[in-house]
Image: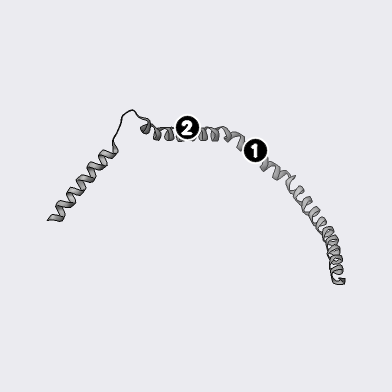
Amino acid sequence: MRGKILFVVGLGVGYVLGTRAGREKYEQIKATASRFWNDPRVQKRVDDAQDFVKDKAPDVAEFIADGAKKVVSQVSGSKAPAKSTTTRKPAAKSTSSSAAKSTAAKSSSAK
């Protein structure tokens, strides 16, 4: 029991000391990041990137819309033959072609 109490007390002391040291390091990293982000050179690059995106956004939107239209036309185009009014009898074709194959196989095996 005494060992468990000492373990819990040790955890508590470690937690308190660790959070103090951790908080100080966190504040230091936060201040460094803030100085970096607010640097005029960084902000200039951020502004340049925003302007570039604003200029290219309509072109990208048009490209995506054209691609979407192409996909829709391909998908609807691939379904069009299935909806056609002409009737095909694929079973008859496959039967006649399989019959022709079996006849050819019989004639070649007879030789």
Q: Nearer the viewer, residue 59 or 80?
A: 80
Sort mark 1 into few (<14), some (14-19) or many (20+) by Cα contacts within 10 Å: few
What secondary structure is found at the residue carrying circle 1? helix
Question: Relative to residue 92, is residue 77 drawn left or right?
Answer: right
Determine whether the residue tagged by mark 2 lies in a helix, strand or loop: helix
User: What amino acid is labelled 1 in the image?
Assistant: Gln
Residue at 23%, 43% (x, y): give it: 97
Query: Residue 75 at what x, y percent from top left?
Result: 43, 35
In the image, residue 99 lies at what x, y percent? 21, 45
Q: Nearer the viewer, residue 37 or 30?
A: 30
Q: Is residue 43 left or right of residue 107?
A: right
- Which residue shows up at 81% across the image and 53% down it? 27
Q: Which residue is mark 1?
A: 50
Report x, y in % for residue 8. Answer: 84, 65
* Residue 9 at x, y percent in the picture: 87, 65
Amino acid type assigned to the residue bearing label 2 in the image = Lys
Residue 33 is tagged as none
* Residue under numbered circle 2: 69
**Colour theme:** one colour
Q: Tell me the CA gap for discs 1 and 2.
A: 28 Å
Labelled pair 1, 2 in contact (Cβ < 8 Å) = no
The correct choice, above or below, for 2 with respect to 50 in the image is below
Residue 4, placed above or below residue 50: below
What residue is rendered at 73% in x and 46% in y?
Answer: 37
